[in-house]
Amino acid sequence: MAAFQTPINRPILSRGPISLGGFLFFVGLSIVVMWLDQGGRYLTPVRRGLSIAGYGVEVTVASPFIAWRSLSEYFATRARLLKENEELHAHQRETDLRLQRFDALEQENQRLRALRSSTERITEKFLVGEIMSVDLDPYRHRVRINKGSSDGVEKEWAILDADGVVGQITRVGVFSSEAILITDAEHAIPVQVNRNGLRTIAVGTGNIGQLSLPYLASNSDIHEGDLLVTSGLGGVFPAGYPVGTVKKIDRAVAQTLVSIIATPAAALDRDREVLLMVAPKVPLESLDTAAPAPAARPARP
Amino acid sequence: MSRFDHVTRWPLFVSSFVALLLGLVPLPGWLDVVRPDFLALVIFYWAMHEPRAGRLWFAWTAGLVLDAFRGVVLGEFALAMTILCAIAIYLHLRIRAFPIWQQAVTVFAALFLYHLTLWIVDGWSGHPVTGMAHWLPPITGALVWPFLSGILDKLHHRL
């Protein structure tokens, strides 16, 4: 039982059991691994293996939260459930009403598109996923989603919630995948102003409630409260989904560009269920483009 | 359980696993920013008290696992963890003799180096982290060190 007491044949004052060679070996190994992973993506199988092993750990971390949720759902009072049911029914009626109009509009849209002899858009297919209760990094807006390649998820799928665009998949594991949120400082999404079709790019700020629109000239037609929707350029995000609303415009006289802050439409920090969606491959000519806009910057090389 | 120079490693594995979990549990924003690097602290502890059990290979592997979880370039945490562990092993006799506050200061210095490594690699791999909040975990790490080492001492000496 005396596992950590000094046995007889071990010197009491052991020399530091570290060899310079060993240290240099591991430092060198780290550098080689970083170099391989950064440059050529040679380590995808390694990462895949680690992600399978890691899935168990993630489930362990998430399980108390899942247990708490199911417990509190189990003990939810009848009154609350009735109220919630009523609310959902009301919501359903409202959406049904809107959907009736939507059918007609879609028909009309298709007719108009046929008139303009442009390609009709393929209906998007989607998958429902759940954000796992795992923290990745406080400085990067990354989340893990409980759908992976075994569910058919692929890199660059768009992620949406009920209110708008959430982000995109950056790395796919077997059972889970990693996604970047639109507010991550390394993310950019092609958008257009819903009111007049003005196209630009919304860049993440690293702040969960803020997007920045740094590439608009100071005489651009954009106002506070304008809705920004995805433009569909870049081929990652399907067109026409809300991204955010313009919150603050700062037109400095001396600047050629205007600095604009927008609030994301999606509930980025409160979401649990999300939709994973493949962007339909829309040929660029079919979009009413006058000038080509820069494509979506990939989230991570 | 162990005979002579065989070293029992399960306390190292168990405490490292728990530390890994502690590092992944979701916390509210501000708490997340000051969250100490539990895994690094645990590895530092074992490297300093049981340099034979807490070998470099283990620190390196633990770092690689962290890399996979954090979604950073593979090898980043592995490198930082190797350096941290090497410092602890190299200085283990001296650190063991220190009073606890002086140990905490050493831990701060080691964690600072750990974060410096991460910061440099982040910059190199094209994901620079700006803002001073990045340097808070070494401070909180040093603050929790007395408690953490107290808890691990219990585990260590109960065997």
Image (cartoon, rainbow, N blue to C red):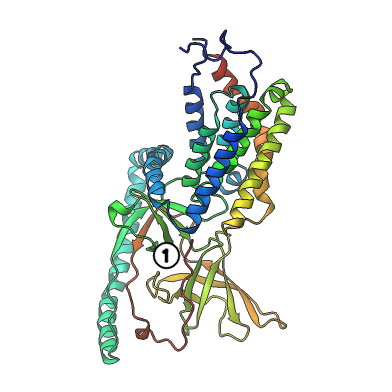
In the image, is B121 to the left or to the right of A39? right
Q: What residue type is labelled 1?
A: Asp
Helix, strand or loop for disc 1: loop
In the figure, A155 relative to A240: above or below? above
Q: Position of residue B134 (x, y in %)?
A: 65, 49
How many numbered discs? 1
Specify the farthest residue to the bottom. Answer: A115
Is residue A74 among what the camera can see?
yes
Chain containing mark 1:
A
Q: Position of residue A65 (x, y in %)?
A: 42, 40
Which residue is pictured at 52% across the width and 53% down the height?
Answer: A35
Specify the farthest residue to the top. Answer: A8
Which residue is pictured at 56% across the width and 23% down the height?
Answer: B52
For label 1, the residue is: A163
Residue A75 occupies which quadrant of the picture? Answer: top left
Which residue is pictured at 58% across the width and 22% down the height?
Answer: B50
Which residue is pictured at 48% across the width and 53% down the height?
Answer: A36
Work out whether residue B93 or residue A109 is closer to the camera in this orientation and state it: B93
Work out whether residue B99 or residue B47 is closer to the camera in this orientation and state it: B47
Q: Position of residue A236 (x, y in %)?
A: 40, 69
Q: Position of residue A58 (x, y in %)?
A: 41, 41
In the figure, B73 relative to A186: above or below? above
Q: Residues within 10 Å of mark 1 (few under 14, many from 20)?
A: some
Work out whether residue A253 or residue A48 is closer to the camera in this orientation and state it: A48
Residue A116 occupies which quadrant of the picture? Answer: bottom left
